[in-house]
């Protein structure tokens, strides 16, 4: 039997939902082309701004920068140099 609170009611099990501005924002930086990760230009913990180059892909003998779409802190690097990636693969994760 559940214990009752000071007023004889069961303790609430309701969860408080934080306001939208307090929910961590996550940005996934994706490969815009199929190619090979030529160079990673950031490290976990780095602060990046919108438009900063976070990686460089090589495809058809051309180097193409991958830029952060938003500002944030690098929380995960999901690729490594020399790895083959497809268009749409998540390479880097940023959060607030």
Image: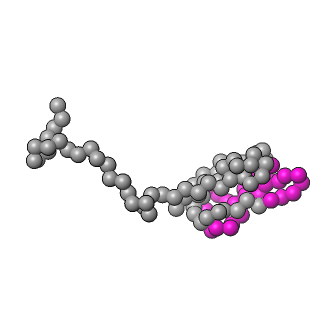
Q: Position of residue 2 (x, y in %)?
A: 18, 35
Report the residue at 11% width, 47% height from top: 6
Judge left or right: residue 32 versus residue 49: right
Q: Does 48 appear in magenta?
A: yes
Report the residue at 32% width, 53% height from top: 16
Report the residue at 88% width, 52% height from top: 60
Judge left or right: residue 63 versus residue 87: right
Judge left or right: residue 75 versus residue 22: right
The stretch of residues the image draws in magenta is: 35-64
The image quadrant of residue 94 is bottom right
Whether residue 81 is visible:
no
Report the residue at 14% width, 43% height from top: 9
Q: Where is residue 73 in the image (x, y as percent from the top left)?
A: 57, 61
In the picture as drawn, the residue positioned furthest to the right comes out as: 61
Q: Where is residue 55 in the image (x, y as percent from the top left)?
A: 73, 58
The image quadrant of residue 75 is bottom right
In the picture as drawn, the residue positioned furthest to the left comes out as: 7
**What's the coloring here?**
one colour
Q: Quarter of the image for the N terminus: give it.
A: top left
In the picture as drawn, the residue positioned furthest to the top comes out as: 1
Whether residue 11 is visible:
yes
Q: Where is residue 36 in the image (x, y as percent from the top left)?
A: 80, 49
Q: How many marks?
A: 0
Judge left or right: residue 16 versus residue 67: left
Instruction: Establish if 87 lies above or below 56.
Output: above
Secondary structure predominantly adopted by residues drawn in magenta:
strand
Instruction: Establish if 27 lies above or below 5.
Output: below
């Amino acid at each position: 039997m559940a214990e009752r609170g000071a007023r004889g009611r069961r303790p609430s099990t309701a969860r408080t939902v934080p306001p939208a501005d307090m929910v961590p924002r996550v940005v996934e930086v994706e490969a815009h082309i199929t190619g090979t990760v030529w160079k990673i230009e950031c490290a976990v913990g780095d602060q990046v701004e919108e438009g900063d180059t976070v990686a460089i892909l090589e495809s058809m003998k051309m180097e193409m920068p991958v830029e952060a779409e938003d500002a944030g802190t690098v929380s995960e690097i999901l690729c490594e140099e020399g790895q083959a990636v497809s268009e749409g693969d998540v390479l880097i994760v940023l959060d607030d």
